[in-house]
Image (cartoon, rainbow, N blue to C red):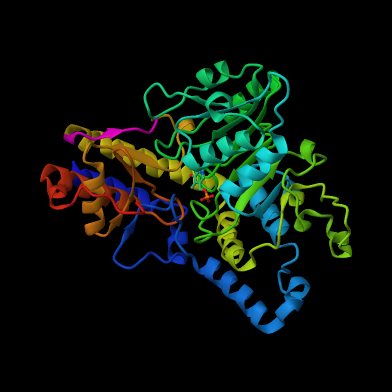
Amino acid sequence: MSGRGMEEARRRDGGDPLARFRGRFHIPPGTLYMDGNSLGLASEDALASLERAAASWRDLGIRGWLEAKPDWFTYGERLGAKMAPLVGAFPDEVVLVGSTTANLHSLAATFYRPQGTRRRILADELNFPSDLYALASQVRLHGGDPERDLILARSADGRTLDEEALIALMDDTVALAVFPSVLYRSGQLLDLRRLAEAAHRRGIVIGFDCAHSAGAVPHRLHDDDADFAFWCTYKHLNGGPGSPAGLFLHRRHFGREPGLAGWFGTVKERQFDLAVDFEHQPSAGGWQMGTPCILSAAALDGALDLFAEAGMESVRAKSLELTGFLLDQAEARLTPLGFRAGTPREPERRGGHVALEHPEGWRICCALKARGIVPDFRPPQVVRLAPVALYTTFEEVERTVAALEEIVRNRKYEAFSAARAAVS
Ligand SMILES: *Cc1c(COP(=O)(O)O)cnc(C)c1O
């Protein structure tokens, strides 16, 4: 089986139209990297734009705000426009700013308006906990009680969410709904359009956390009618640790007052009038607060060029092929050893990573790392693997499966401690 797996992997690598992009990335020496959904790798392009930004600072000092190429003053808006096609938005509907959690706060502060009996926020128990912490604190800021006012939809199997069950919870006590596009643990992709349609029919504002889909799954945020969305750029988008997050705001909301205002959200031409009255830019840019983090954003500039060049549709096509191959191999070779795939099989229901569950998940991850393979671990027992379209080969997927097979068959994980590290 494993011999046939390798043959098949090599055949697919041979026909891969995106193969040429791998050479533009720095693969950490001696590693087989399967963690691009936690921190994407550095590319030549990203490092070059980062160096350009540092050189502008060195050579221009404060003049860089207007004279750097590209200028720093409109950096967030410009990167937003560059990002927009990847998520199906108009250029002025996206800005790159802050962090994912901070953007959720800013958007919830804009859209969560508890009134009368419509006071609740609807989310789900499988969402990334930072989002739930943020939403609970927003409820408290409005004088509510998260126990009562933050509803967490339950998952029937602990892995996935059923859109119909989410829709059934959208009643007239709900003011705001926030769901992930792709679930960070299982990798399930939700049907955003269906959820947005159902929410709007019931007078509910709806936003999506696209942290695990941006750069892996093409979105149509505008046409799917999301009210807002937010995502990280250091995962599938390879912007580097701490690169600014994405914020999408549907055009019909440009006239709203930003919930957390600041001077970088003001109309550009008048920002340096330093007027006492706040007038926000009628675009996602209006949702910026303070001075953009130019050096943190700079690597993303180059990283996004790779997506423009490769095309989001090709990235998705290869990503689906990689995860499909991984799931097929896992099914044949790893399920007999006690693994279970937690990721849906249907292409339209999965994002860019695969969750393999095993009761010894943590120690299996340790054993993978000892072999130079970088997965990540999510409790209670998920080995998370992200073969990334721009830099992972099918052969690497095969080698990962072979390593898992060997580790479990020969109980190699027993050599590792069950105590977990601080970052997994
Ligand atoms: C990674 C991730 C985050 C992280 O938020 P930061 O503010 O960037 O730390 C938030 N939500 C989801 C779903 C994520 O996957």
Residue 338 covered by magenta stretch: yes
The quarter of the picture where residue 33 lies is bottom left
Up-down relation of residue 118 to residue 73 (above or below)? above
Return the residue found at the far bottom: 59
Give the quarter of the figure containing the N terminus. Answer: top left
Q: Is residue 28 or residue 178 the one in the foreground?
A: 178
Q: Position of residue 185 (x, y in %)?
A: 40, 38
Q: Position of residue 102 (x, y in %)?
A: 61, 49
> Range of the magenta residues?
337-344
Give the total number of marks visible in the rendering: 0
Q: Residue at x 36, y 48 (%)?
A: 12
Q: Position of residue 245 (x, y in %)?
A: 59, 52
Task: Say whether residue 85 is visible.
Answer: no
Residue 208 horizontal side relative to residue 29, left or right? right
Task: Say whether residue 71 is visible.
Answer: yes
Predominant SS along the magenta part: loop
Q: Position of residue 88 (x, y in %)?
A: 65, 42
Residue 351 horizontal side relative to residue 249, left or right? left
Residue 419 horizontal side relative to residue 75, left or right? left
Return the residue found at the far left: 410
Q: Residue at x 68, y 33 (%)?
A: 112
Up-down relation of residue 332 to residue 73 (above or below)? above
Q: Residue at x 73, y 75 (%)?
A: 64
Up-down relation of residue 243 to residue 362 (above or below)? below
